[in-house]
Image (cartoon, rainbow, N blue to C red):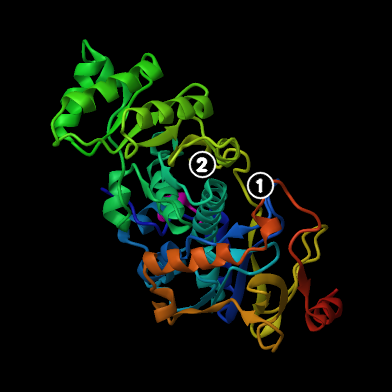
Amino acid sequence: MSRYFTEALFTDLYELTMAQAYHAEAMNEPAAFELYFRSLPEHRNFMVAAGLDDVLGYLEDLQFDQSDLDYLRTVGEFSDAFLQRLAEFRFRGQVEAVPEGTVVFPNEPLLRVVAPILDAQVVETFVINQVHFQTLAASKAARVVLAAHGRKVVDFGSRRAHGTDAALKVARAAWLVGAAGTSNVLAGKLYGIPIVGTMAHSYIQAHDDEAEAFRAFAELYPQTTLLVDTYDTLEGVRKVIDLCRRSDEDVRLRAVRLDSGDLAELARRTRAMLDEAGLGHIRIVASGGLDEYKVAALREAGAPIDAFGVGTKMVVAADAPHVDFAYKLVEYAGEPRTKLSTKKVLYPGRKQVFRRMAHGKFAGDTVGRDDESLDGQPLLEPVMRDGWRLPAGNISLADAREHAREQLDRLPEALRRLDEVAPGYPVSISPRLERELRKLS
């Protein structure tokens, strides 16, 4: 994809004005910032962390080029001395994070950046942007995958995504949490995701005869999926059956796709017609305004649908399009820092999340200081040192996908439900962390 800009200026202005103030005051001590979200969106019982790979790639490559500096000079806010500091900028900090695909809950740090305060400050906007959106996308897609209960889910959302970058990131996030593929060809190239797709209604409409359209397409693509609802769905199925009866062995259709109407009833009647014709190998794909709720309803109704193409409502996370992520200073110059704003209290110091298991399922988390030894598995791990990725920050998407599968398998059954459960997953704060907050209050 052609690019005419660097990512260095993908930041809010106040990040740079604060950075100049730090520079003017010679404030260059190490700072620790932690990224977390304060509450779950409505109807959610968990989130799935994603976006770390893009954050680490950004930090490795981040620099201000001459055109960036020339533009900042025109703003009129920045001194030559500060612009020279930006010209020499390279991120050389440390990052600890939970692996992509990890199930996470409110007030748990997903990521921590430790670097000179200027460096850690200017990256805030990009870090929140990538982790917020991709975590939102992965969490929505995970709900769809869980609702499908083993049936395939394919990302069909690119055309209605909020921009090209969003479409690519949703395709990746959906694959991360168990989708079977994407319709987006560029996502297939960039991420190695299987690409899926055959025809749209326009192909059928462009022919004078629906049966002729089916025949021509199937001869070119013998293992294809035919879209049967352009005019009359069941009549389209009959034409598919007739095509298979008349064709030689080179035409062996893979599936038919239903894209409108009463999908459950149409799927039942389609399945019966195909089976009666001896075409039990032809599978049924459903699409058209689907989300996790409709997928679950179709499955619970016993609809014989083998795969779901899910688009708009997944790609824009229609029912919960934002999460209240925050990137907050928790330590500066070796001293813990806090924030006491109403309903936004920040626990001071670097933290770790300890997760307990019981009978193979998640049983509860404790957020404590990063130097505590508490019951459970620590979730955050070092992924970057001195601005370069460590092995834990360089895992493949395939490995992240397997990690996500294991995480979702370990979710307690109640949390896999689509409706919000109470009291929800238990996340506690360690006594030591509570004491340190009181000392600073």
* Residue 143 image offset from top left, x and y in percent: 57, 49
Q: Is residue 86 left or right of residue 262?
A: left
In the rendered image of this protein, does residue 338 appear above or below residue 142?
below
- Considering the numbered disc 1 on the image, is that residue within a helix, a strand or a loop? loop
In the foreground, 243 or 372: 243
Give coordinates of residue 33: x percent, y percent: 61, 71
Q: Are marks 1 and 2 in contact (CB under 8 Å)?
A: no
Residue at 70% from the left image edge and 65% from the top image edge: 107
Secondary structure mostly seen in magenta is helix
Pointer 1 or 2: first along the chain: 2
Is residue 207 covered in magenta? no
For the C terminus, give its image quadrant.
bottom right
Q: Is residue 377 above or below residue 158?
A: below
Picture coordinates of residue 165, whole percent (x, y): 39, 47
Residue 390 showing in the rendered view? no
- Residue at 66%, 70% (x, y): give it: 362
Q: Nearer the viewer, residue 59 or 316?
A: 316
| Drawn side of residue 195 relative to residue 21, left or right | left
Please tell me how crowded label 2 is: few (under 14), some (14-19), or many (20+) other residues with Cα within 10 Å: many
Q: Which mark is residue 418?
A: 1
**Among the 4 quarters of the image, the one containing residue 350:** bottom right
Write the start and end of the magenta stretch as one range: 72-77
The amino acid type found where label 2 is placed reads Met
Describe residue 397's horizontal placement relative to residue 123 as left or right. left
Q: Please determine whether, in this image, residue 359 is positioned above or below residue 173.
A: below
Q: Kindly identify the amino acid type of the residue bearing the numbered disc 1.
A: Leu
The residue labelled by disc 2 is 314
Q: Residue at x 31, y 60 (%)?
A: 66
